[in-house]
Image (cartoon, coloured by chain):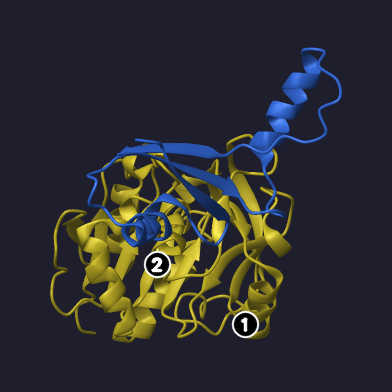
Chain colours: A blue, B yellow
């Protein structure tokens, strides 16, 4: 089973990387971009038997740092 | 004076472990024990544990994230819970926040760039085991070398840290965008200190300054007597 974990910085947490990307986009002449926030996409291939609770625990224990990040689990259609 | 038994943990990618061991040896008079990240147990009867700077696991996932889940860290967390003093410097500080031994997180520097220079720090709390050798409010100069030293915690946590005197050091100049200029924090019991600046790089004149000496001297004196 393919699982995608989207990790993003919580609202309000400063994202210098997103800001640098934003500046670079402006430097390339793209206008109308109001804000850029950079996150992380982690793709997992797990056995069918792996429970939602277990995936959740993987996120909370390692894949995301709950002090600064949120996560969203997306399971690919079989 | 009984012997001071310290251990320095090395993770894959640590690069300040030797400097840390050297500083501890010069100041305590005894060579610290060296511990590998994959070890499941720490040596017995330790007086002090140091987590050094570096780029453990190449900073993969998040700085300190993988190291904080390594086998030795279970033993370090257990020892810290028993009151054994733990000092984490730079990447060691990141490992301490990732492990939950210290609150908050270290984000990318607000100026994006890696910062590598000597900075001025204000000693906020001189009542801890690590800082008793300084005067309260004293300004000291210690080098920093990091890309992710921007301390973040929510306002309630920051208020609690300040209210409980757990801010050990504050930057006395703009360095990395840290919340309330926090450079080093203590845990609730006061036996765990994490800091981004490198005291082990400022212990003798040849380093360009020796303001880091008092930190190690405080710990050695506090633990085994003068």
The answer for how far apart the CA atoms under marks 1 and 2 are is 17 Å
Residue B208 drawn above or below residue B187: above
Numbered badge on residue B87: 2
Q: Secondary structure at mark 1?
A: loop
How dense is the environment of label 2, judged by Cα within 10 Å: few (below 14), some, or many (20 and up)?
many
Residue B81's x, y, as percent? 32, 82
Specify the farthest residue to the top.
A28
Residue located 63% across and 44% down the image: B109
Residue located 79% across and 16% down the image: A27
Mark 1 or 2, nearer chain start: 2
Q: Quadrant of the N terminus of chain B?
A: bottom left
The chain that hosts pointer 2 is: B
Is residue B29 visible in the rendered image? The answer is no
Residue B33's x, y, as percent? 17, 62
Give whichever of A73, B4 is nearer the camera: A73
The reply, left or right, for residue B23 in relation to residue A33 is left
Q: Quadrant of the C terminus of chain B?
A: bottom left
Give whichever of B65, B47 is nearer the camera: B65
Numbered badge on residue B135: none
How dense is the environment of label 1, judged by Cα within 10 Å: few (below 14), some, or many (20 and up)?
some
Numbered badge on residue B165: 1
Is residue B118 visible in the rendered image? The answer is yes
Q: Quadrant of residue B136 in the image?
A: bottom right
Q: Secondary structure at mark 2?
A: strand
């Amino acid at each position: 089973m393919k699982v995608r974990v989207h990790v993003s910085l919580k609202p309000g947490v400063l994202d210098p990387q997103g800001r640098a990307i934003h500046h670079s986009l402006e430097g390339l002449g793209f206008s109308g971009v109001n804000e850029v926030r950079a996150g992380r996409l982690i793709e997992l291939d797990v056995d069918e038997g792996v429970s939602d609770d277990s995936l959740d625990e993987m996120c909370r224990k390692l894949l995301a740092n709950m002090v600064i990040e949120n996560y969203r689990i997306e399971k690919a259609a079989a | 004076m009984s012997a001071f038994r310290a251990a320095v943990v090395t993770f894959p990618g640590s690069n300040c472990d030797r400097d840390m061991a050297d500083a501890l040896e010069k100041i305590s008079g005894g060579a610290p024990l060296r511990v590998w990240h994959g070890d499941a147990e720490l040596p017995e009867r330790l007086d002090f544990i140091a987590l050094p700077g570096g780029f453990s696991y190449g900073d993969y996932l998040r700085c300190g994230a993988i190291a904080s889940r390594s086998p030795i860290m279970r033993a370090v967390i257990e020892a810290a819970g028993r009151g054994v003093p733990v000092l984490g410097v730079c990447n060691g500080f990141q490992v301490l926040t990732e492990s939950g031994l210290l609150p908050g997180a270290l984000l990318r520097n607000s100026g994006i760039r890696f910062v590598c220079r000597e900075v001025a720090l204000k000693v906020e709390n001189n009542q801890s085991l690590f800082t008793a050798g300084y005067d309260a409010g004293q300004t000291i100069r210690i080098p920093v070398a990091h890309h992710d030293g921007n301390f973040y915690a929510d306002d309630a946590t920051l208020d609690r840290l300040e209210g409980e005197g757990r801010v050990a050091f504050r930057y006395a100049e703009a360095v990395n965008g840290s919340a309330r200029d926090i450079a080093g924090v203590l845990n609730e019991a006061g036996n765990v200190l994490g800091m981004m600046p490198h005291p082990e790089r400022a212990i003798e004149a040849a380093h360009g300054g020796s303001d880091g000496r008092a930190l190690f001297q405080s710990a050695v004196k506090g633990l085994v007597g003068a």
